[in-house]
Image (tube, rainbow, N blue to C red):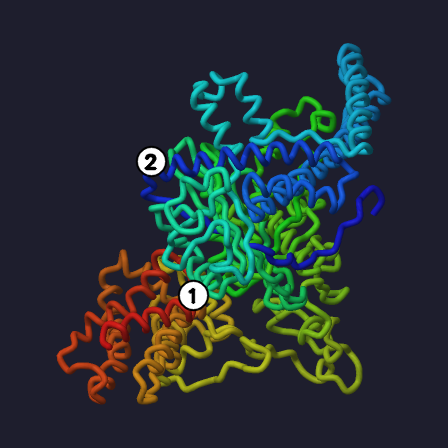
Amino acid sequence: MDGLREVAAPFVVPGPCGVAIRDRLKGLTAGDEEVLRLVGDHLGSLASRDLRARCAAGLKHDGERWARRKRELSGQSSSRWAGSLTKATHDQWALARRGQAAHIRSLEAGIGAVRLRLSLPLGLKGSKRAAGGYGSESEWFAKSRRLRVLEDRLERERADREAGRVRVVRGGKRLLNTRHHLERAGLTQKEWRRRWEASRRFLQADGESGKRYGNETVRVSPDGEVSIRLPAPLAHLSNAAHGRYVLTARVTFPHRGETWRDRITVNRAVAYRIHEDTGRGRWYLTASWTIPPVQAVPLATARRSGLIGVDTNADHLAAWRLDEHGNPVGSPRRFDYELSGTAQHRDAQVRHALIRLLHWAQRHGLAIAIEDLDFSAETTREKHGSRKRFRKLISGMPVARLRARLVSMAAELGIPLVAVDPAYTSRWGAQHWKKPLTGKTRKTTRHGAAAVAIGRRALGHPIRRRTSPPQQDQSDRAGHRTVQAEAGIPGREEPRPRVPGPRTRCVLPGRGANAGNQNTQHRSGCSAEHGPWQQDSLPLSPSCRVSQGSPRSPPWDRVGPLRGRSGALHLTAPGRLATGQTLTDAALGTVAKQTIYRWWSTKIDVLMDAFLQDAAKDLVQQDSGDLAVDLRHYLRQLAWFLSASDSGAVFRALIAQAQHDPEFARDFRARYLDEQRRRDRLPLERAVERGQLPSGLDLAAEIDQLMGPVYYRVLVTDEPVGEEFTDRLVDAFLRRHG
């Protein structure tokens, strides 16, 4: 279409290439803190001098100058400290060069926007795509002066870049400027000075593969002992051999501690950084290492079972699940976060929202589709003028932080991420999906509609919904049309089922037939010409029709016809069982209403019978003669049944129903829970008979410890219950009983 920019193709986001973990140095003595400050201040002064030398060299820097800088630093520290200093200095200079290039691009964009608006007539209104002219002559004059300022600034920046000059402040330019606004920042001069000195210290060492515990300068043993190789001028402060200082604090690294411990045990490289948080009065140790790039799954594999579309907003994530054909499934989800307070609080809020999103995706085994956002060019006042509220809104969106967190956490859980072009997703989602997805019991927001648009683009489908045929063609004269189903799906071009009623009960030969079915045309040799039309019973799946059954069949034989293609009941959504509604028309279309109400008075009874049948069929105990094998197999089977199967959703709905229906709760305990407890005890009873467990063991208490965490995660925390979790429960049980 004219005027629309080209939309980039979706792609699978590669995983992270490094890992960083942090732990607090608890229990440091005053002497330990004094030594850390002396070492950090000494190395920080060397880093400042080296950065000045690196910036002076500019583009003329080469390997020989690097070696000369390192030799000069080695005499005042050590060769390994000098290597870490020169590498950190070069990285800081390179980062400043990248920031300089981004600043030049921002200036060029701002100058172009101002020039465009100056060329337009005064008072010309703008649109969503482009800004209009300035509102008054005074504003036009002020912007023309600003244009000259921006052009002069751009000329200086270009000259600096060509000469290789960068401007770097060790400790940060923002903190440096805070010195002039202490009252606004809520700091005293002494507090600012402590923060400034802490930010300029240098206490980081690169790892070395093959050296003891992966780092010779800052060494951390598997039991958490931290020791530092002191620089030459401070060697007299050592309290251990070879000029080392051992801290009294120990570290454990609760997060990924086992991975870190396995790495240092085989002497693989790990880099460390020690820094002080002056606001809390704490010291922290950060460990980091590189990991091999994870092979991203093919895009077709990520799309195979559908995915979850996610729309990023300033205060929440809007998500909607889509099947492989791009159809929204279930209800939208909203994951809120509050971006106020300290940086640690904001980061925790983002992590919590992402954890809930990832657990939802992991439970359904789906990939996540998210926009490839970058608002660096959207926050300039030259583009949006006086729209300060909008500029503040998009500036506050945690795009970079959220993207980095999501990539790292998704890679840890093995969930693929699909990035899509964000162009027009909000606009087209609201245009094509907001109204159709809004009903009497659900009000769809524009963010939920945008999530559907994002998911459809990631799946390779057009965002636009299937359009309705003209009014005169709604009787299928033009045939059944759809963009939801692929060409190879059976029934894609079949006619719609007839609606029972007066207009279809009596159909003359060759009349009222659907044009999409060639067998209904008025021609010789076709059934439509030789007899009245009669509707067949509608099958629930392409391969299975509903059996007629016997009028006196027991209820168990009547559960099967009420199942959908996946084997789950499609009578109503879980969690809506207490409304007293009757069975849906979808179920009644497959089995006669009289047959259903002959055996079940409410749909709760239908779900109960179907669930009991599934539990008896899926939760089958095996008897291998090995208690560990039998328990692992059964707990994995139980965790999958409760969390990932369709029957698990029915179980959660029945539990919710039992909370406010005492009569049903008693029936549920008598018919399911008692039988389930018998199934849970069976492996332990067999082990007692074989002599693998003591005869006096309290089986009920042991079953509670084994099965209780699974039910707790499924019903309360909604955390994943994978094989690793259930195996840990079994291992803990076996350790208790030897």
Q: Nearer the viewer, residue 377 or 191?
A: 191
Considering every residue shown, the one lying at the far top of the view is 138
Please tell me which residue is depicted at 64% across the width and 68% down the height of the picture.
301
In the picture of the structure, the residue carrying the numbered disc 1 is: 583
Q: Position of residue 305 (x, y in %)?
A: 59, 67
Q: Is residue 270 above or below residue 151?
A: below
Image side of residue 733 versus residue 254, left or right: left
Q: Nearer the viewer, residue 298 or 448?
A: 298
Amino acid found under the numbered disc labelled 1? Leu
Task: Give the structural element (helix, strand or loop) at label 2.
Answer: helix
Q: Is residue 333 visible?
A: no
Image side of residue 204 versus residue 103, left or right: left
**Cβ atoms at labels 1 and 2 below 8 Å apart:** no
Q: Position of residue 595 (x, y in %)?
A: 41, 76
Nearest-to-viewer mark from 1 and 2:
2
Q: Position of residue 575 (x, y in %)?
A: 39, 58
Image side of residue 212 versus residue 484, left or right: left
Total marks in image: 2
Q: Is residue 378 above or below residue 71?
A: above
Q: Position of residue 476 (x, y in %)?
A: 72, 65
The alpha-carbon separation of the residues under discs 1 and 2 comes to 73 Å
Task: Give the structural element (helix, strand or loop) at label 1.
Answer: loop
Please tell me which residue is depicted at 50% across the width and 41% down the height of the picture.
232
Image side of residue 280 versus residue 394, left or right: left
Q: Residues within 10 Å of mark 2 (few under 14, many from 20)?
A: few
Instruction: Tell me the quarter of the picture where residue 342 sits.
Output: top left
In the picture of the structure, the residue carrying the numbered disc 2 is: 30
Whichever of callouts 1 and 2 sits on the residue coming sooner in the sequence is: 2
Amino acid found under the numbered disc labelled 2? Ala
Please tell me which residue is depicted at 40% across the width and 58% down the height of the picture.
718
